[in-house]
Structures are given as C-alpha cells and as structure tokens.
Amino acid sequence: MVGAPFELVSYLMLGTWLTNAGVTFLPNFFLFDLILRNADQSTTHTPAALVYAFIISTMIGQAITFVLSRKYAFRANNNVALATFFTLVLIVVTIIANGFVGPAIVMVVGRTGWREGAVQALSKLLSMLVSMAWRYPTARFVIHRVVNKKQEEK
C-alpha cells in the first residue's frame, strides 16, 4: 500500500484527462471487446479512458511501490537482479489484470447512483485491494526476502 496514494491520484487525474481528450480507441482484443459490450452509461468516462487510466496508474503505483517496499517496508537483502525480474513479472500480471478488472468494478459501482468522483475513487480503491491479495504475499515471501547468512553460504 506504500504506492497507493500515487496510484489513486494518478488514476483520478488520468480518467478525467483521457475522457476530456476524447480517447475512445481500444485495440481489437477479445477482453477489450467484452468490456465494450458490457459498458453502460453508469460513468461519464469512456471505457477506453477507464482501461488506459487503470493500466497507467497501476504502472506508476507499482514502480513507486517496488522502490519503497524493497528498502523500507521489507528491508530486503536478497539478489536485486532476481527481485527486479520477479517484480517486473508481477507488475505485468497486475497491470493486465487491472486493465480488465478495474473497468468492470467501475461499471458495478457506477450503478449505485453516487457522484462520479466517489464512483471513480471507490472503484480504484477496490481494484487496488483486489490486486493486493496476490501482490502482498508475492512481494513479501518471494520477491523481497531477507536472506540469512546461513542461507547465503548454502
């Protein structure tokens, strides 16, 4: 959660900016087509703006989280190159998942009738919580491990 504020703020800014810029293009991909078919008018943002805002904000949040988690949250001392590789794999999976899960959450939360800002903020927070379910255990026990001297000698 150390990168959560950056991820949330960038998402809220990007969603509005991309919608105002008129972003409507999504590549021809079956998951994007599924989002477009299930999109309704429950939000003022276009489906493409939602997908791109979720993907870009997740990239920003994950980059900040890696740096802060490694040194401050977990105090890891394992192989930096290996940790970076595993983090990149985790980030790619998380970005892809948030690109699809995030807009679906917005569609569901948007049906509550709440104001647009509340819908967007709650939707991003929910998607961050969902992805934290696989990110935290992976980061804590696989990526940012603390290696004892005995383990290094083996």
Image (tube, grey):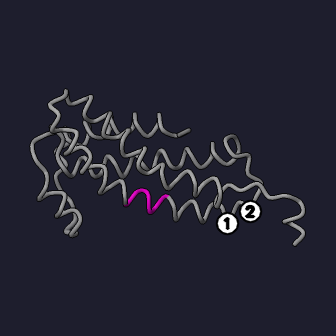
Circles 2, 1 touching at the beta carbon (< 8 Å): yes
Residue found 10% across the figure and 47% down from its top: 40
Which residues fall within the magenta stretch? 91-96
**For residue 121, what is the image quadrant?**
top left
Examine the rendered structure and indicate whether residue 80 appears above or below residue 123. Answer: below
The percent coordinates of residue 59 (x first, y second) are: 45, 51
Q: Is residue 4 left or right of residue 122?
A: right
Residue type of the residue flagged with mark 2:
Asn
Report the residue at 23% width, 65% height from top.
31
Horizontal arrangement in the rendering, residue 61 relative to residue 9 (left or right): right
Q: Which residue is mark 1?
A: 82
User: Is residue 94 highlighted in magenta?
Assistant: yes
Tell me the residue at 58%/58% (across/down).
138
Q: Which mark is residue 139?
A: none
As helix, strand or loop, the secondary structure at mark 1 comes to helix
Identity of the residue drawn at 67% across and 48% down: 70
Classify 85 as above or below 53: below
Amino acid, disc 1 = Leu
Secondary structure character of the magenta stretch overall: helix
Q: Nearer the viewer, residue 105 or 85?
A: 105
| Magenta stretch: includes residue 31 | no
The residue tagged 2 is 79
